[in-house]
Image: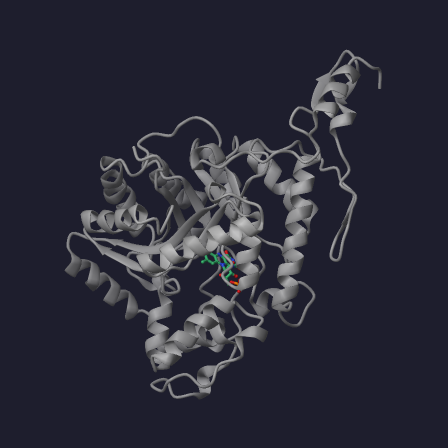
Amino acid sequence: MAPTPMILSAFFFNPQGDHRMSWRHPDAPGREIFDLSYYRRLAEAAEAACMDAIFVADHVAMWDSYESNIAHYANARLEPITMLAALAAVTRHIGLLVTASTSYSEPYNIARAFASLDHISGGRFGWNVVTSGMNEEAMNFGRDANIEHASRYERAEEFLAVTKALWDSVEDDAILLDRRSGFFADPRRVHRVDHVGQHFKVRGPLNVPRPPQGHPVIVQAGSSEDGKDLAAKHADLHFARIRTIEEGKRYRKEFDERLQRFGREPRDFKVLPGILPIVAQSRAEAQDRRDFLETLVPARVGIDLVSSWCGIDLSAYPIDDPLPPLPDISTYDGQRANLERLMGFAKERLTIREIARRISNAGTGPVMAGTPKDIADEMAAWHEAGAADGFNLMFPLLPGDWLSFAELVAPELQRRQLTRSEYASGTLRDRLGLRRPVNRFRSECSHASAKSSRSDEP
Ligand SMILES: Cc1cc2nc3c(=O)[nH]c(=O)nc-3n(C[C@H](O)[C@H](O)[C@H](O)COP(=O)(O)O)c2cc1C
């Protein structure tokens, strides 16, 4: 086994796959996407293949600003924290990464939920920290439009600081349950956080003991400067949009410098580029599958998708023309990574129709299509070059692409000793080679005095 095994995270946003219109495919699931058994089958396949984690993305809104989506409602799905809590009960080893928004929740709620998830899963949870960039989301939480980009990230930064403090507020060995003395917990190891900031006022302590991992694994995928700073300061795993090995190497180098600015070490931060694996018997068959998926995107949905990426309603523009002038990125409040990608397409003079095709497939990550050997070769090349610590696997069509990867590509990677063939004991952090965070409230002094306090009467 290589010293640092390749990390595999099996991702989905749409339960039918990450191609936007995969739900129309004849092999797509139907109503079972609202049943636990569907997800259980996916989780069991990923666990049998010894993958590191399942990762579920989320928005707190129905995407319906544009006409076609009112007709399709294609992003209806289960609330993912609830769904992954249920999966924790039917899996034993695999990590469970789930999305929650810092813009539309409160630190105390999130700290409690994730501490509880970490306990019930035996230390297997991670939190994908998102700031939520859609107007539709803002409209469900008392606003008419998105929170401004910089404010979203300021709030996220404060949110994370408070949440981490809350996780530390009940020290690891604070719970005594000492029937004789009457101490449920050692009062010297339970702390208020007394936070008063720009966005939050939180007293604490948390009413859940410190999570088994200390802090659940923190995941961040922001790609603007603010997003990358948040990741460099707080995240353990970073999902990145990288298209080539060279870009991945540059990205890693740039992040190592950024980490240093925040006093962190590169080994505490893993970069996982998103890839779109399509496993087939041959490259020609893989290409046919891609082409077929493209036929499922009605022109109107494509236009709406491009519209949502740049905040301009493009329905009045000719579909076979290039994009109109795009908004200024430095003041754009939507997802800046999306706008930046469109700016690249605009430079290439692609038409709206061509762009729609490209971005329908999970937002333009590199497609790795072909035989299991082809896909393993490409993944190995990225990993060996230092362009990726592992991959976020964004399957175009579920359950088929996920199950084929687990059955055909995962064993090939194991055979080459690039990934693990069995789960080691320990938490998700342990398996990913991430250190357990030190508790900010912990001190030798409090440890010693806490011991002596145990025999006191309350
Ligand atoms: C793999 C991946 C998964 C993501 N999952 C979510 C998600 O579940 N919910 C969400 O609102 N944004 C999600 N995003 C968007 C990012 O959190 C971020 O907003 C986006 O990359 C734009 O960066 P910026 O916010 O720094 O401008 C995801 C991005 C990537 C690359």
Which image quarter is the N terminus in? top left
Query: Toward which corner of the image does residue 251 lie, by quadrant?
Result: bottom left
Q: Nearer the viewer, residue 44 or 175?
A: 175
Q: Residue at x 57, y 31 (%)?
A: 212
Q: Nearer the viewer, residue 48 or 335?
A: 335
Q: Is residue 437 above or below residue 362?
A: above
Which image quarter is the C terminus in? top right
Could you say where residue 53 lies in the image, as x and y percent from the top left? Answer: 42, 42
Could you say where residue 214 lies in the image, as x and y percent from the top left? Answer: 59, 34
**How is colour applied across the structure in the image?**
one colour
Could you say where residue 203 lies in the image, as x and y percent from the top left? Answer: 79, 43
Q: Nearer the viewer, residue 256 or 451?
A: 256
Q: Is residue 77 above or below residue 291?
A: above
Please tell me how many numbered marks the rendered image carries: 0
Q: Residue 312: in sight, yes or no? A: yes
Could you say where residue 302 lies in the image, as x and y percent from the top left? Answer: 39, 74
Q: Residue at x 44, y 37 (%)?
A: 432
Apparent side of residue 222 relative to residue 318 in the rendered image (left or right): right
Which residue lies most toward the right here?
A: 458
Apparent side of residue 137 relative to residue 10 in the rendered image (left or right): right
Apparent side of residue 40 relative to residue 158 in the rendered image (left or right): left
Q: Residue at x 58, y 71 (%)?
A: 333
Q: Is residue 211 above or below residue 36?
A: above
Q: Is residue 153 above or below residue 196?
A: below
Apparent side of residue 420 relative to residue 218 in the rendered image (left or right): left
